[in-house]
Image (cartoon, rainbow, N blue to C red):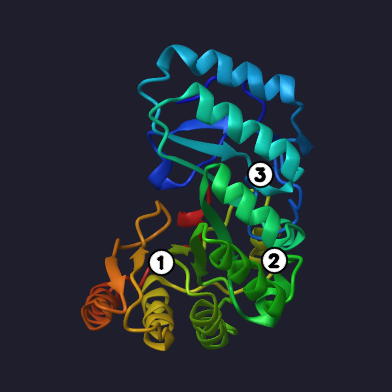
Amino acid sequence: MYFDQAEGNVFRPPSEAYSFILRVTIGCSHNACTYCNMYRSVKFRTRPLEEIMAQIQAAKPYALQIRRIFLADGNALVLATDKLLQVLAVLQQTFPRLQRVSCYAGPKDMLNKSPAELTALREAGLKLVYYGLESGDEVVLKDVNKGVTAAEAIMAGQRIVESGIKLSVMVIAGLGGQAGSARHAYHTAQAVNAIRPHMLSALTLMLYRGSQLLEQFECGKFVPLPPAAIMGELYQLISAIELPAASHCLFRSNHSSNHIAFAATLPKDKARLLADIKAAQSQLADVTEWDPYNNVE
C-alpha cells in the first residue's frame, strides 16, 4: 500500500508486501555500496514533516485495514529522533489497529542513535529494523565500500538488539567473490554470533546494471560464484553460526535473488537446514553453463 508521488523506485523487504509504505526519506544517505544500484537514480533527501503527513492523511480512509507500516527509503534512522518520534506518535493516533512499524537502517545511522534514543523509538512503536550487514569480513566490507569496519558493523547490530527492537539481519552470499568466499562466510557467521539477531536472511549476490561491482566483473577484477559454490558458501556460513540453545532466530532465503529458498529456525533446525543446503548443492552441481549475466537486472 503506497500513497505518494513516484520519485525514484520504492523498495521494501519481502515480509512488508502488505504494509503501508511510508516514505520518510528519498533514496539512501550512504548510496555508495559497489553492489547496489537501488537508489542511484535519485538524490538523497530527508522529507519535511508536511510531506510525510500528507502521505498519512492519504492513507486515513484505510486506517482500519492498516496493521503494519514500513518507513522507507533506504535508512529511516538517519532522521532526527525527535522527528521520528513525532511521526510515530501520529501513526499510533491515526491507525487504531497498528501492530508494527519497521524500517531499513544503515550501520552509521544505527550507531548515531544513543541507547536512550533507540529505547524511546521502541516505546513509540518502532518494533523492527532491517539491517543489511551483508558481510562480517573486514576486507569485503572495505571492497564493497560499506562505510564501516567489521567491528562497527557488529556494534550497530548489537545496539539495536540491546534496545529491545527486533533485528532482521541480511547477508549476501557470494559478496566476496571466489577469492574471498571462505573468509566472507566465516567472518559473517562470527558477526551473526556476536549480534544474535531475531531474524537472518541470506540473499544471493546479483550483478546490477549501474553498479560498480558489475563493472569490476566486466573488467576481470571480480569473479562471482556459480550456483553450486553459492550453496557451498551458505553451508560454511550456517555451519559456523553458533547461537545459544534458547535462541529463536528465523532464517530465510526467500528473496528473488536466491537460487533455492530455505526456511528454518536457528539453532533448532540447524542440522536439517545444513542437510537441505547440501542436497541443493548436489542438485546445482550439474549447472555447468552458468552465466553471471543471468543475474543482471
Please name whichever residue, 39 or 81, is drawn nearer the observer in this view of the structure. 81
Question: What residue is drawn where x is 57% and y is 71%?
Answer: 175
Task: Give whichever of 166, 253 is nearer the camera.
Answer: 166
Residue 257 is labelled as none
Badge 2 or badge 1: first in the primary sequence = 2
Dot 1 or dot 3, earlier in sequence: 3
Task: Say if 162 sits above or below 139 in the image.
Answer: above
Please give the residue where the numbered disc 2 appears in the rendered image: 216
Cα–Cα gap, marks 1 and 3: 37 Å
Q: Tell me the residue at 36%/82% (across/down).
A: 235
Q: CA distance from mark 2 to mark 3?
A: 30 Å
Q: Position of residue 138 (x, y in %)?
A: 69, 81
Q: Which residue is mark 3?
A: 76
- Category of crowding for the residue at label 3, using alpha-carbon neighbours closer than 10 angstroms: few (below 14), some (14–19), many (at least 20): many
**Which numbered disc flags the more N-terminal residue, 2 or 3?**
3
Q: Which residue is mark 1?
A: 290
- Please indicate whether residue 45 sits to the left or right of residue 247 in the image: right
Q: Tag 3's secondary structure?
A: helix
Asked whether the beta carbons under mark 2 and mark 1 sit within 8 Å of each other, the answer is no
Q: What amino acid is at disc 3?
A: Ala
Q: Is residue 96 left or right of residue 219?
A: left
Secondary structure under tag 2 reads: helix
